[in-house]
Image (cartoon, grey):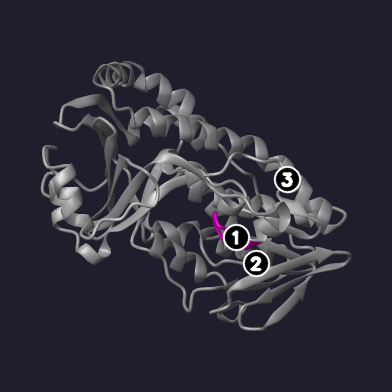
Amino acid sequence: MRVIIIGSGIAGLSAAIALRKIGAEVAVYERAPELREVGAGISLWANALRALDHLGAGDSVRAVSLRMVRSEVRGRSGRKVQLGTRADDLERTFGVPEFVRMIHRADLVSALAAHVPPGAARYGQECVAVEGGGAGAKVRFATGHSDEADVVIGADGIHSVVRTAILGPEAPRFAGYTCWRGICPRPEGVEPGYVGEWWGRGKRVGITTLPGDRVYWWATKNAPPNGHEADERAFLASEFRDWAEPAPALFATTPPDRIFRNDIIDRPPVRVWSKGRVGVIGDAAHPTTPNFGQGGCMALEDAVALARCLATAPDPARGLEAFAAERYPRTTAITRESRRFGALGQREGRLLCWVRDLAVGALAPLVATKGFLKYARFDVGPLPAPATA
């Protein structure tokens, strides 16, 4: 079986690894001129680490990531909203080894790419059309190049060309707030292994420590879509000027040209992820808001499940249908709960925010057990043996 994968991000590279392990020939096409990832961090929950182990990439990812030690939620003044959670307590109580590890996206992509032969990926190839049906599928690129395979997998993100070929054009769904992201030196008072969120009225700041004494931060604000400021760093400094440290220090120590702004978007869940021998995975299939830190984790799970379904189904089209049927319930639950959690964090009313903070502080242990933990304890399962074995 020959498989073309469109996109060399987390979903695309992990799918390439998984498919090669079941004996498939894989070609990865990427529109960017080289392997790269923006300056952002990502949390790998226990479910993602299990998926990486099934792919055989767990050790290489652990070598460039940092284990979470504790997490907490505070108000903009620095007052604790939630007393905090220590990872070792969760791991011991619930039997979840390595509850969360933090990593720079570029380091994760590089670690995954090391498990894919260099000749398997072609860069500077923007997919413009996909045709599927019959005994194969064909992809055309902006360069004039075309290629054919038994299966085509779109791992090309929320604005997926492959998804459009399957479901038709559809605008993403705006969540009502925008997000700034950056990476800076770890501020004084923020220990390695710390993960925290600081909540205000219609605004939040997130802090995730990374290897190398770095911090990945994000800041959100309720705002209309497609906004832009001439100086995003100065705008952040003004908007969060009355917040307690380390929030102001995060912005001040990040170079202006390394601050990225994006609207928070997702898509309503759909059950159809394929058409004939053409399918989608990751954000192309089930894009979610980042509030649960499960977007990249689900992409890693997808890779394992996709390879297993294609290896065990009587034909590729039915394998893609089985993959969607297996993954839809889990990804849909995460997408919906993540959107609701983000809306809670972005509340603006003074009374509503006061009640919210009281509720989060009181219910945090229950939420952690029934919410985040139910996703972190999940195991997508192993890959089957290669067809040639």
Is residue 361 depicted above or below 54 in this figure? above
128 is within the stretch colored magenta: no
In screen coordinates, is 53 left or right of 27? Answer: left
Point 29% across, 16% down: residue: 355
Looking at the image, can residue 220 be seen? yes
Q: Secondary structure at mark 2?
A: strand
Viewer-side residue, 228 vs 132 = 228
Q: Are marks 1 and 2 in contact (CB under 8 Å)?
A: yes
Residue that carries the numbered disc 2 in the rendered image: 5
Q: Are marks 3 and 1 in contact (CB under 8 Å)?
A: no
Image coordinates for residue 115, horizontal then vertical, percent = 54, 69
In screen coordinates, is 381 left or right of 345? Answer: right
Point 49% across, 74% down: residue: 32
Residue that carries the numbered disc 1 in the rendered image: 155
Quarter of the picture containing the C terminus is bottom right
Q: Amino acid at mark 1?
A: Ala
Point 47% across, 34% down: residue: 339
- Nearer the observer, disc 3 or disc 1? 3
Real-space Cα distance between discs 3 and 2? 18 Å
Viewer-side residue, 26 vs 183 = 183
Residue that carries the numbered disc 3 in the rendered image: 272
- Nearer the observer, disc 3 or disc 2? 3
* Span colored in magenta: 156-161
Q: Secondary structure at mark 3?
A: loop
Query: Which mark, residue 238?
Result: none
Decide which of tag 1 and tag 2 comes sooner along the chain.
2
